[in-house]
Amino acid sequence: MAVMAREAWTDERLDDLNRKVDQGFARMDARFEHLEARFDAKSDALIRTMLGGAAVVVVALIGVIATQL
């Protein structure tokens, strides 16, 4: 069996690990905020496009119905 060396986790090392974890989460938060802003802008544009398309379909249907009368 292989015996692994035992590491001592001092308060200083634990504090350093805590800082690294906090920095990693801060970077991830910033990335998610950036992606969320891009998604919101794209979804707003998609909704505007869909509403415009629906308006065109409604007008076309009204035109077709008007020509049948």
Image (spheres, helix red, strand yellow):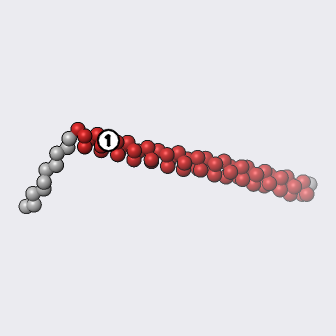
Instruction: In the displayed orientation, state which residue is furthest to the front.
Output: 12
Q: Is residue 14 left or right of residue 27?
A: left
Most extreme residue toward the bottom is: 1
Q: Position of residue 26 (x, y in %)?
A: 43, 43
Say whether residue 54 is visible. Answer: no
- Report the residue at 78% width, 55% height from top: 57
Question: x and y percent of residue 32 in the render?
Answer: 50, 47
Q: Residue at x 90, y 54 (%)?
A: 66
Quadrant assignment, res 15: top left
Mark 1 = which residue?
18
Task: Name the side, left or right, on which 25 lies relative to 39.
Answer: left
Q: Nearer the viewer, residue 11 or 26?
A: 11
Q: Tell me residue 69's x, y (percent).
A: 92, 54
Q: Quadrant of the N terminus?
A: bottom left
Asked whether, in this view, residue 44 is left or right of residue 31, the answer is right
Residue type at tag 1: Asn
